[in-house]
Image (cartoon, helix red, strand yellow):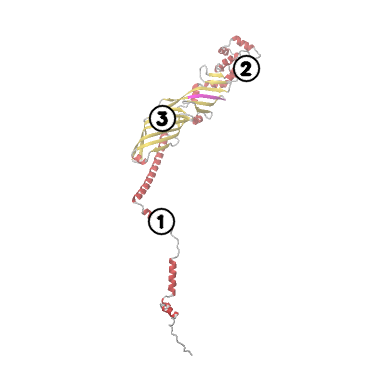
Amino acid sequence: MRTPHRIDAHPRPNPYEELGALDDGPLEETPLRDFLTREREEDAEDAWTPPDHRRGGRRRRKNRFAGLPLAVKAVVGLAVLASFTALADRWALLYAEHRAADTLKDRLDLAAAPEVEIGGFPFLTQLAGERLDSVSVTVPDVAADRVSLAKVSATARDIRLDADGLTAVRGARVPRFDGEVQLSFADLNRELGASRMTFTGEGRDRVRADGTLPVAGHDLRLRAEATIRRQGERGIATEIGNMRLDIGDLATYRPGTGPSEGLHLTRKGAADLARETRKAKALLSVPAVVQRMGVPEATVREALADDGRPTQLTGSPRFARQAQNLNLIDLALDHPQLLRRLGLDPDLLDSLSGLTRPVLADRLSLAFELPEPEQGEVRLRDVRVEEDGIRVRVSGSGLSVGG
């Protein structure tokens, strides 16, 4: 029988003993409450909060401006100062223009204040130096005799001021100015024509008038031409010519005493007279008419004795021309019934005899004269008729305003 052998082996380590060796001590030395509190504080530090853009943006802008060079800051400051200076200069300019307009309105007795524009920049520097580069003045609707000037404009340069400082300007001296006067046809039609007359340009120096004129209850068509010319240094004159009043298509009246003036039958009126035997015989029955027409007496007796068709005399072109040459005004007083037979109103002829050339010319006169200044001189340089009216260039020198 075998004897059992004894086997000697190393004892295994206890794992629980190894874990116990790693223990630092009792749990009470690190309380669970402190551990949890530390955990919450760490989480709070990591929590999200919204960004503050306002304060951060302001801080960034401040920082950016603070970082600008000194030269840039100086330029910005000068630009701001220049802006305020320019604004103050413009306000002073507007105030001066307003004061000047009111002064001119009072001194010239105008219905409305004119437009005043002071040129040059800066204004305050000019005012301090008592000298203005330029001043432009525009005055609308200026009364001039029987008509109104649509616009008077002038520009003066190098004006010298009579002033004490920037606020006390007593007057001004104008070495020279150039301007323009406009006389509108629209104003002429309204003022002279009384809605019955129209004026239009015809050439460089002529104006045509066309409209109606009431005479003894009849509306007669009036035609005339006005030649515009300069009169002296400050005046405009008009010479009225080719005036005629049409009495329908029967007769035409031209004021004056010349052979072609007075009251004459038109070509159509004379032709109708030659075709109407009754009117022709009424005309030939007046010896004075026969003598003026130069018709032989034998021919007249033959024409008066013919009760039928018109004779060779009344139907001839020569008879019509001779009838046109008769001045019917001369027959108005002595033979009113004859004119009535011809279709003319004797009262109308009496009124026409009083419409002399000066009377009609006065109705159509466009003349005016610029006022004479107390100091210096104003003169007209050029007169021109244009499509919309009459334009006159003017100039002046040595003027003084105020003072």
Q: Which residue is mark 2?
A: 275
Give the mark nearer the N terminus: 3 vs 1: 1
Amino acid marked by disc 1: Arg
For the record, the magenta segment spans: 218-226
Q: Give how far across and how far down residue 397 sits, in percent.
A: 37, 31
Q: What is the chief secondary structure element of the magenta stretch?
A: strand
Left or right, 282 with respect to 397, comes to right
Left or right, 317 with respect to 229, comes to right
Amino acid marked by disc 3: Val
> Given this view, does label 3 or label 1 mark the residue nearer the observer?
1
Residue 58: which disc? Answer: 1
Q: Residues within 10 Å of mark 1 (few under 14, many from 20)?
A: few
Q: Residues within 10 Å of mark 3 (few under 14, many from 20)?
A: many
Give the mark nearer the N terminus: 3 vs 2: 2
Q: Is residue 31 above or below residue 70?
A: below
Q: Give how far across and how far down residue 287 sits, in percent.
A: 58, 12
Residue 394: which disc? Answer: 3
